[in-house]
Structures are given as C-alpha cells and as structure tokens.
Amino acid sequence: MQTVRDIEALRQAVADLRAAGGPIALVPTMGALHAGHMALVAEARRRASHVVASIFVNPMQFAANEDLSTYPRREAGDAKMLDEEGCALLWAPDVGAMYPAGFASAVRVGGVGEGLDGAARPGHFEGVATVVLKLLNQVRPDVALFGEKDYQQLAVIRRMVRDLDLAVEIVGVPTQRDADGLALSSRNAYLTDEERRAARALPRALGEAAGAIRAGGAVAPALAAAVDKLAKAGFDPIDYVELRDAETLAPLDALDRPARLLAAARIGRTRLIDNLPVAPA
Ligand code: PAF
C-alpha cells in the first residue's frame, strides 16, 4: 500500500489506479481504526478493484470544547491494518494540505443535518460535509463507504451527493458491535473499565425500545423507558433518544414507515451515539 500526503502525489497515485482499470472505492476515516472500519474496507473490496482509504482527523468537525487534541492517533498501526485488508492507497494529508492558508468555504446541508447531532454539536455536520466533499473531489471514487453507526452523518452525505450532483455511489455499511452489543467506535478507547461496563446499557436500552415499538407499543413511553434506563446506568447528559423517519430523519410519534431509533448520551467524559433500524411489521 502506498501512502501519500500531498494533493499532487494523490492525483498521480489515483491516476495510476485509474490507468490500471476498474472501479475505485473510497473509505474516509479519522484513523484509530477498528473492526468497524475494516468492514468498510472489506465491503469496498467487494465493490471495487482498488480501495483508497483516507485518514484525516478533521478539525472543522470538532467544536472548541470537543476532543480534537485527545482524539486517538495511531497512523502506523492503522496503515498496517489497511495494508493487510487489501487497501491500495492511503491518503493521509496534514491540516495544511487539506485546509491551505486562506481556506474560506463550507458546505451546509439543511434538513437531515438539523436536529439530533446537528443541534447537539453546532457546526459538526458542516465540517463533515465540507471535508467529505473535498475528499470526494480529491479522489474521485466511483463508490464511497460510510458506517451506519453515524447514521445522521450518512444521511447528510447522501443528501449532499444528491443535491450537488456528485457522480459517486454512497454505500452505508451496518454497524459492527462487540460481543456485549456496544457499537464499535474509536471513542470507546476513552472509556474506563467501569464506564465500558455501564455503556452496554446504550445498545440494550435501544434494543428494548425498538422491540417494544416493533411489537406495536406506543412510541413516547418506549423512548421514555430508554431514557430512564440510560440515566440509571449513569449516562448524563442524555442528548436524545428519538424515533425518526429512516430516510428524511423527520420525527415520528408512530411507527407508520421504516424508521430509525437514534440516541446520543455521555458516560463520564465520553459521548456515545448509537442507532437501530425499526421497521413496521
Ligand atoms: O466518520 C468519520 O470518521 C468522519 O466523520 C469522516 C466521514 C471521515 C469525515 O471526517
């Protein structure tokens, strides 16, 4: 696997892959890779002849009070994992290569980008959409893959790609979980052992609420029960536990179409998010 760090070298390396023929897939990441990312790469390999991965901890998607400086960085280990999984090219720019002096543009996606994490993390999706548009323009892949763990992010990216006529297929890959149900996330590395045990309440509370709603139970009490379970497990604050339309992310108070149950809450200093599909019977 080749690693490139400036845009000229990236263009040349991508041109070489194009010349070799066959579709190119992009797997954008912020590094600190785990089995969830490897599932993206494996799916990318099934769909394309060449897989390009990017590692860039994007300052634009972190608010001033968030974990940019402590976000786990371990590029050497990441590169080894990507190489073993069959990645052809690693795009690992530094901040100056991604945002040269004078950088002044931003992409704002309304609708699906508002509410939920859009409300809890002002500016976050603007940072995500801007960097993902840049990555798509830089690599020009045929297909780009994102985890469903960041479900609202995936919706924002799909909307942006449709709205801005980008010629790329966006593929969502189901969330990978540990044996106890916790969704894999680079931020799980922040959890103490005690917090890690308590964090199991998040997938459990969502699973129980999803089960109750699927079984025909009323939505509001199911969501309230999930909030209660999270609070009892020590989550504080609980930013949201909500049922939304699976595509538009419009709020739902009854399960009358394919839906997604989404939650975000903090345990200790770590903010965790998770979501589950909820389809009407
Ligand atoms: O999901 C992530 O890791 C990031 O938000 C992404 C899509 C790589 C953009 O920085």
Image (cartoon, rainbow, N blue to C red):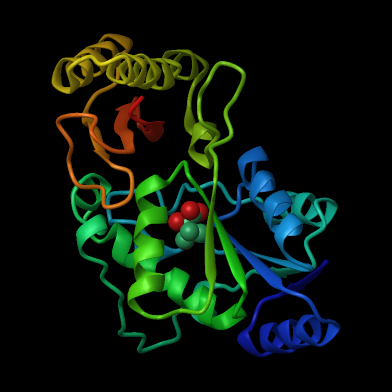
97 or 229: nearer the eye? 229
Image quadrant where residue 273 sits: top left
Please state if 264 lies on the left or on the right of 178 as rendered.
Answer: left
Image quadrant where residue 261 sits: top left
- Quarter holding the C terminus? top left
- Quarter holding the N terminus? bottom right
Please state if 266 lies on the left or on the right of 197 as rendered.
Answer: left
Q: Residue furthest front?
A: 281
26 or 158: nearer the eye? 158
**Where does residue 62 sit, x and y in percent of width and height?**
35, 57
Identify which residue is drawn at 53% across, 73% down.
168
**Where does residue 72 sit, x and y in percent of width and height?**
55, 46
28 or 209: nearer the eye? 209
Q: Is residue 63 above or below residue 90?
A: above
Q: How many callouts does the rendering have? A: 0
Q: Is residue 30 above or below residue 220?
A: below
Identify which residue is drawn at 44% across, 53% down.
69
Q: Is residue 214 above or below residue 127?
A: above
142 or 84: nearer the eye? 142
Identify which residue is drawn at 57% across, 28% down.
177
**Where does residue 3 sit, x and y in percent of width and height?**
75, 71
Please state if 64 lies on the left or on the right of 188 as rendered.
Answer: left
Image quadrant where residue 255 sits: top left
Identify which residue is drawn at 40% across, 63% down.
157
**Where does residue 19 sit, x and y in percent of width and height?**
81, 88
